[in-house]
């Protein structure tokens, strides 16, 4: 039953750094970062440990690269949404805070889907090492900008005023982040469809516009 | 600086089964169920291991009791919401699926806040033992009933028809479950306020009813 080609292919010399990183992230998510050794990763890749150290200097460097991939894209999206002039194409008036918030929620869903393994890892970070502490610091920066944007949208009168903006911020991005719990990477739900579902639910609400009069 | 009364109080003979369970759940959430031994729990409580075995037969029994506390309340809420006659007080017509869904989302938030440590543990279960497999089975039963209720509300025309009901179900309860990530047990946000925020966001939407015409 065994396929004699499989182990040979896994151990082939063609691994590059991004292959090693991808397998490392998958393994960290599966069995936990702390519980995973470079020896485990070598076995998973069918490589020797020294072959892995040809690509990266440490397990911590792999974690740092993965977290950076997620954080860089999220930070960029937040930066774009929280800089009104940045968000407005040349010749157009700056977008409202509401429009920028709605676009940012959609963009966050897309980033999460595109980098689901790295975002999953990021959301589990607890601050057990300098790399993790630095990542938590960047997450807090992102969360603070998100909360600012929700408050700005509330202040311009675009959001309903019977829900606290800080609570709105946590619920909105709590819903976005919860995607990592059930969305299957490469699954049958498209990122655009997901982004539309999340923004429609959050901003327009689920209740039908013309409820049944019965 | 040390309070000589503190260790004595922790080690006092007055521990009952619910104290042991509460400390066990806190410890499982803090350092992981698999990584926690009965010896760790004994140290945490200032008891001997044999004193703990006076209260419970095994670590797995503690897990089972904790998961059951969360699952029993959630199942009861789902049972109530998915049985139209059960949901309608005597003499009143059955509530619509929409009303029952909205009430169930609010009730889920309240159960989560009331049993936050046990629900946190439940949401981390991965199926590594018969107790965990049984809990996952009960979670799937709950999820399937939730999805049925969302579909029933969509079919009666109460929900907007441009978002897939299965996606709605996942996003709704993803948002509810995300509370365990940031809500502080005994914190400053009341369960009723949280339940109102979640249902308002999800069903009515965040956008102000009369948007700024600018």
Image (tube, coloured by chain):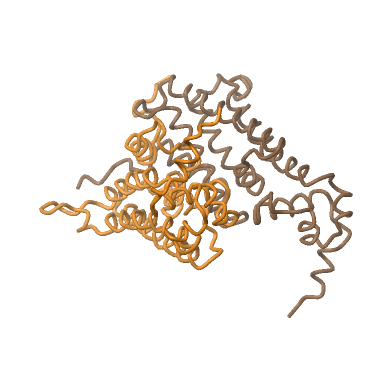
Chain colours: A orange, B brown
Query: On the rendered structure, is B54 left or right of A7?
Result: right
Quarter containing the N terminus of chain B: bottom right
Query: On the rendered structure, is B117 left or right of A14?
Result: right
Please determine whether, in this image, residue B173 is positioned above or below residue B145: below
Query: On the rendered structure, is A105 left or right of B48?
Result: left
Q: In which quarter of the view is residue A64 placed? A: bottom left
Rendered location of residue A9, percent (x, y): 44, 40
Please determine whether, in this image, residue B163 is positioned above or below residue A82: above
Rendered location of residue B160, percent (x, y): 37, 28
The number of numbered discs placed on residues in the rendered structure image is: 0
Q: Depth check: B58 or B214 in front? A: B58
Q: Depth check: B38 or A172 in front? A: B38
Question: Residue at 23% of width from left, 57% of height from top?
Answer: A84
Rendered location of residue A13, percent (x, y): 41, 49
Rendered location of residue B175, percent (x, y): 48, 42
Q: In which quarter of the view is residue B45 placed? A: bottom right
Question: Residue at 36% of width from left, 59% of height from top?
Answer: A145
**Of all residues shown, which one is farthest toward the bottom?**
B1
Q: Depth check: B32 or B177 in front? A: B32
Question: Residue at 50% of width from left, 24% of height from top?
Answer: B97
């Amino acid at each position: 039953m065994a396929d004699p080609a499989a182990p040979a292919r896994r151990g082939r010399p063609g691994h590059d750094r991004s292959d090693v990183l991808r397998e490392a992230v998958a393994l960290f998510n599966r069995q936990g970062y702390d519980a995973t050794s470079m020896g485990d990763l070598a076995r998973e890749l069918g490589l020797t440990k020294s072959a892995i150290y040809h690509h990266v200097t440490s397990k911590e460097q792999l974690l740092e690269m993965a977290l950076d991939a997620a954080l860089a894209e999220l930070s960029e999206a937040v930066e774009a949404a929280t800089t009104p002039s940045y968000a407005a194409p040349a010749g157009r008036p700056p977008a409202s805070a509401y429009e920028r918030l709605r676009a940012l929620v959609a963009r966050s869903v897309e980033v999460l889907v595109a980098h689901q393994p790295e975002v999953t890892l990021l959301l589990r970070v607890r601050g057990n090492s300098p790399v993790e502490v630095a990542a938590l610091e960047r997450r807090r920066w992102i969360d603070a900008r998100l909360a600012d944007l929700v408050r700005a949208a509330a202040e311009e009168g675009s959001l309903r005023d019977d829900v606290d903006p800080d609570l709105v911020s946590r619920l909105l991005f709590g819903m976005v982040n919860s995607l990592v719990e059930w969305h299957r990477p490469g699954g049958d739900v498209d990122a655009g469809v997901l982004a539309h579902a999340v923004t429609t639910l959050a901003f327009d609400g689920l209740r039908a516009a013309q409820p049944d009069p019965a």
